[in-house]
Image (cartoon, rainbow, N blue to C red):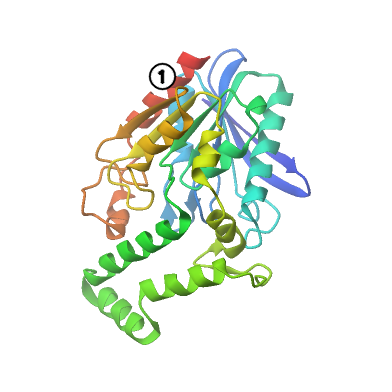
Amino acid sequence: MREEEHVIAAGDVALAATLALPEGEDQWPVVLMVHGSGPLDRNENVPPKHNLDIFNTLARQLADAGIASLRYDKRGCFGSTGSYRGHGLSDLVADARACLAWLVKQGRFADAFVLGHSEGTVVVPQIPAAEVSGLILLCPFATPMETVLRNQGRAMAESIATMPGLRGKLTRLMLRIFGTVEARQDRLIAELKSQRPLRANASIGGLSKRNLRDHLAIDHAKLFGAVTRPTLVLSAEHDIQCPPEDGERIAGMIGATANHIQLRGLSHILRTAGPDDGFAGYAEQMKLPIDAGIAVHVAEWIHQQS
């Protein structure tokens, strides 16, 4: 594999990107990778502490299978310009479309596919069908964002309740003083559902409130029901952030052009996990590489479409 560094214009934003290329001649299929939520770099990392190394690992594995890929720093993060805290969902769609248009202009690729992870799975279906050869939805969700936020708050509270040591004691003390995780989620949801204008660049926990408000307005059945391109849906069995049962639901919404595979024994961050690991298990999981079977599924499916 060889890699090239590029800067891609998306309106008035400059996106810092890495193009990963297989060995050999041009005219490979190419995959554009669209992030999950948070202020992530092109590898889905928040250095130096939270390094998922998802997209860079997939890029290397796909290159070995003869598939090129493009990954980029999210707007306003690391090497990319623009506002991260002030962005909305439409900005993420515009950035992905700009990257796709750039790939087409290169004249080096046979077919262009788009892979979205987590939040990215509601970004990529909004790209016009004429611009893509197919979609890959990795850890998708069709559950309304309000329910997702409440479920994540509940899962976080359960993890904190059993968090060991001094860190656990201090965290539980802070929650008694400032309010429970569930109460904070209730306040956030009420603010997002109100008609009050949001403060410029308003964010919570590293997430743009404007973006979260956009998510609350999504009709998932309408969004996925409008997809006409071939779609690979990959849900993770032990995903505590995006309900694993949503994978089959989404495939049903899309219809005959969708193929659903459940990734057995994997968490939202694509590592081996137990059914009760919760958020507390992420630290140990991140010491492991992502499951190699994901790239196998993606590569086999892409070659079937190309």
Q: What is the x, y in percent for residue 35?
A: 52, 45
Q: Could you say which quadrant of the image residue 27 lies in?
A: top right
Does residue 136 sit above or below 15 in this rendering?
above
User: Can residue 224 be seen in the rendering of this structure?
Assistant: yes
- Image-based side of 133 in relation to 176, left or right: right
Identify the residue at image location x=38%, y=25%: 297
Closer to the camera in the image, 246 or 295:
246
Closer to the camera in the image, 181 or 22:
181
Q: Secondary structure at mark 1?
A: helix
So how many labels did they put on this image?
Answer: 1
- Image-based side of 232 in relation to 174, left or right: right
Badge 1 local density, few (<14 within 10 Å), some, or many (20+)?
few
User: Can residue 34 be seen in the rendering of this structure?
Assistant: no
Quick one: which residue is furthest to the right in this view? 12
Closer to the camera in the image, 168 or 221:
221
Q: What is the x, y in percent for residue 120?
A: 52, 43
Q: Could you say which quadrant of the image residue 170 lies in?
A: bottom left
Q: What is the x, y in percent for residue 98?
A: 70, 37
Q: Could you say which quadrant of the image residue 212 lies in?
A: bottom right
Residue topped by disc 1: 300
Q: Amino acid at mark 1?
A: Glu
Identify the residue at image location x=55%, y=66%: 193
Q: What is the x, y in percent for residue 124?
A: 57, 38
- Image-based side of 130 in relation to 53, left or right: right
Identify the residue at image location x=32%, y=84%: 176
Does residue 95 sit above or below 208 in this rendering?
above
